[in-house]
Amino acid sequence: MSGGFRDGARDAGRRRRRGRGEQAVVPDAEFASYYGRPVLKRPEWKPLDVAGYLFLGGLAGASSLLAAGADVTARPALARTAKLGAAGAIALSLAALVHDLGRPARFLLMLRVFKPTSPMSMGSWLLAGYAPLTMAAAAAEVSGRYRTAGAAATAGAAALGPAVATYTAVLISDTAVPSWHEGYREMPYVFAGSGATAAAGLALAAVEPAQTGPARRTAVLGAVLELGALRLMRRNMGQAAEAYEEDRPRAWLRAAEVLTAGGAALAAGGAALAAGAAGRGRVLTALAGTALLAGSAALRLGVFHAGVVSAEDPRYTVVPQRDRLTARSRTGEP
Amino acid sequence: MTDDIARAAGHTDPPPRMGFFTDTSVCIGCKACEVACKEWNAIPEDGLELTGMSYDNTQGLGASTWRHVAFVEQRTPPPGAAHGGAPDDVDVFDAARNLTGSPGGGEVRWLMASDVCKHCTHAACLDVCPTGSLFRTEFGSVVVQEDICNGCGYCVSACPYGVIERRPEDGRAWKCTLCYDRLGVGMEPACAKSCPTESIQFGPLEELRERAAGRLAQLHAAGAGDARLYGEDPRDGVGGDGAFFLLLDEPEVYGLPPDPVVTTRDLPGMWRHAAAAAVSLAALAVAGFAGRPR
């Protein structure tokens, strides 16, 4: 029916998406749109604030686990770094969240209601419980006093930490943004792994190698979980996966893969070296830690930008929905 | 059933659910609705730009545009012919000759449609709002309380229709209120009041659905086989719209999603996966410490 726009919009989409001679995951589908304009509104979140919030939440949550483990296994330097890291990261993430509000002065209204249908409401309550615990744990660590209270706060933060690291996946998946929503099954695992590599990275960068054995193993396990779940997510999300192939998200994700895999490999290999030459081992593990931190941040930016791309291009909204309707009419459902 | 949403939201003894039926087959693109809406709701200017794409310079719904008249100029392909090229390729003189000359040639037609917030039965914006600023009124509509909104922007990404938006100079989210203030005193919304062709019809949703079914049958009988209702089915992905439409082409031609689904439908699954992932993360850390002593 609608000749001109259908073809025009399709051609524009094709021009934007291809660039480096890659193969499309799904063959081009002809689709109609209103002069190529997006159906959805572009997410209004600022990339640095929100990707930073996702990254810092993962770093904090997983650091709380390392802190508790380090306390239990008597690794004081690891415990100190993890506790300070968790408190610092969550404080920064709260700052990023408030900064991203259209009305920052009204941030306390986040706690006006308790609303299970809103991941942001649940996250606010979670952080309202978690952030003070990390601060208390860090304060007890630094002051060296109130050890019992500090141990309780450390344990409490470790109990909430995994939820802090993974709820952010629900936060972005619970939107109409195709490349976020369609990944809701695997995204929490991607974020869990990414949080683990970030926390391990901080520990490796800041703690002497003699105490970072658990951090090294966490880095390797986290990298496997993160990169494996990411691959699975992109394979299972249908056409929405193509947004992850577009220029900006792809560059960030490529960087994330290289930094995370490289950092984890270096962390594992660094252990062997550290046994021989202590000085060189220290430099290598610090380098591994920095790469892991950077890799986790790059992953969040890649995921963020993929979502933005999928909201800006109507084909990500129209084509899967049209396919769904066609399939339904074939099976005779309403 | 779906019209009981006001009661479900805590209103005791609510009035019938009110809504819009926008019959685009009689829309003449006059934009009186856009103007009336802006005037009544005192909405600020939303950019004075010429798009060059059509007579539509409003472009779409947004924080400061609560009614938007879409304008689609299309050429139906001659029977058996391929689709026409991009708009740039059209030679208007050729097109004009084809119109009068060849008996089997394509036809030019204009589609006009006044878009608005759908006031969904299952409203994603309302579900995800963390402050409770968005709420369900006694009329079944969805309204932002501007004194509570803290501008988190979650509703913007959650809306499957791309309706609600943050106003940059203000920081808060805004959208159609179904003229909540006018409804309160028994008046109809400004856009419906101003519509000269009764393309925008306001009333109890139940009644509008009957009226729409009648109009659809009438159009089908008159040979307009492409006429279809959009958003009237309570079994769709958003539980049916409080503002639904009669369209003459596929929804996406008007910039509407063909099969929108409220994102929170999958929320229980999302929480389950997040919980399992949280357990995995804890297990992963335990495994990290369980290894060798170093």
Image (cartoon, coloured by chain):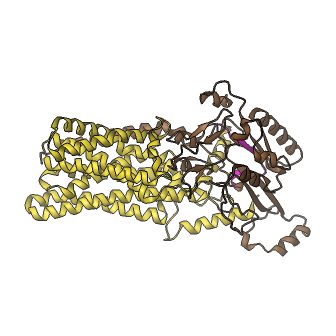
Q: Which residue is the extreme one toward the top?
A: B13
Residue B112 shows up from this direction: yes
- Which chain identifier belongs to the yellow chain? A
- Which chain identifier belongs to the brown chain? B
| Left/right of residue B81 with respect to residue A16 in the rendered view | right
Return the x and y of residue A213 as percentages of the image width and height: 16, 50
| Left/right of residue A295 with respect to residue B267 in the rendered view | left
Return the x and y of residue B45 as percentages of the image width and height: 67, 60
Residue sitting at 91 percent across and 65 percent down? B103
Against B61, residue B143 (above or below) is above
- Quarter of the rendering occupied by the N terminus of chain B: top right
Against B254, residue A147 (above or below) is above
Against B174, residue A314 (above or below) is below
Residue A242 shows up from this direction: no
Asked whether B228 or B129 is in front, the reply is B129
Return the x and y of residue B283 as percentages of the image width and height: 27, 40
Return the x and y of residue A55 as percentages of the image width and height: 36, 53
For the image shown, how many numbered marks are present on the structure? 0
- Report the magenta residues as a range: B239-252
- The image quadrant of residue B97 is bottom right
Residue sitting at 32 percent across and 43 percent down? A131
Residue sitting at 50 percent across and 37 percent down? A117
The magenta stretch spans residue A239 = no
